[in-house]
Image (cartoon, helix red, strand yellow):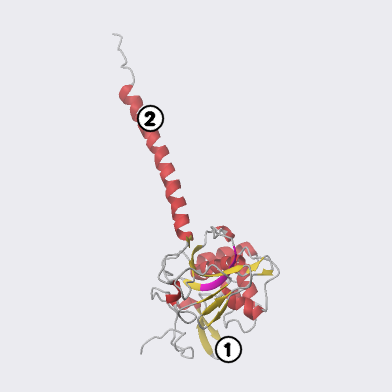
Amino acid sequence: MSIHTCGEIPSSIYCTCYSQTKQQQHHYRQHNKTKQTYGCCDTVPNPVNIVEVAGGCSASSFTSPVTYLEYLDTLTNLTDCVYSQFFGGKTNLTDKTIYLQNEFPELYDNALTNMQVYNNFFCDSGTEIPKPTLSDHQVSCTAGYVPYLISYQTNLDNTPYPNYVSICQQDGNSFDKITTGGTALNYSAYYYYTANSIPCVNNSCSTNYESGNYNNLANQSPIFNGKEVKDKQTYLIAGCVLLVLGLIIFGVLSYYIFRPGIELVG
């Protein structure tokens, strides 16, 4: 008997859950009593899908993965998962957060990452940001916005593959480091390329390939790389620490090497 993922055979009582690196994560399996199916709840829905199902934005921005997951639990027809089951029966927000982060780190990080994308690219403090319209060979935003594709992922070792979503960014705004929730978002931003093979910098552009085709990125590097920004800062801090340590060690060695000799009086 082979064990399948619940996504492939959701009605099998033998199905289980796996990470992106094929590590078994059976503790994320949930059973839907109404549909009599099983699902894996280590991930959360795409932020654009959340806005569509909710019919708009939440009244305010989220600052905690726990409150974000609690909001998802209020949306019917979004997912079969009940995320409150991963809070260990805790009632205090701090206790819920600590329990979720320690016991279910994949879900915690996925919720945090998607919460950051939701807050920054789809819902700004309760105000909905325009979403792109994707059709065959066309990508469009409302006037004053430019369409982009962003990739984003957690920093966990067992989630190496990014998610992708199309967004509209206000014309003239540049991408920047995002640290909502205290952790920097690992994301990259890409231009769409037009049928003339130039970057789309207008609110609406024709493309050579159908919607969702990676060739619309023209195999170009991202115009912004959040992970690179974070890595540069890490290297800078590490370099400063090493420099200070080097100066201290050099000073100590210099003192002992070049200090005047001590004469003994006998």
Report the residue that reaches farthest toward the right: 59
**210 above or below 69?**
below
Distance of mark 2 from mark 1, alpha carbons? 70 Å
Image quarter of residue 255: top left
Q: Position of residue 70 (x, y in %)?
A: 63, 72
Q: Which residue does the numbered mark 1 point to in the structure image?
A: 33
Please tell me which of labels 2 and 1 falls first in the chain: 1
Q: Which residue does the numbered mark 2 point to in the structure image?
A: 251
Q: Position of residue 49 (x, y in %)?
A: 59, 78
Any part of residue 212 in sight: yes
Pointer 2: residues within 10 angstroms few (<14), some, or many (20+)? few
Report the residue that reaches farthest toward the left: 266
Q: Position of residue 244 (x, y in %)?
A: 42, 38
Q: Position of residue 192 (x, y in %)?
A: 49, 71
Residue 13 versus residue 181: which sits nearer the camera?
181
Query: Which residues, given as a range, are shown in magenta?
Result: 165-171
Report the residue that reaches farthest toward the front: 196
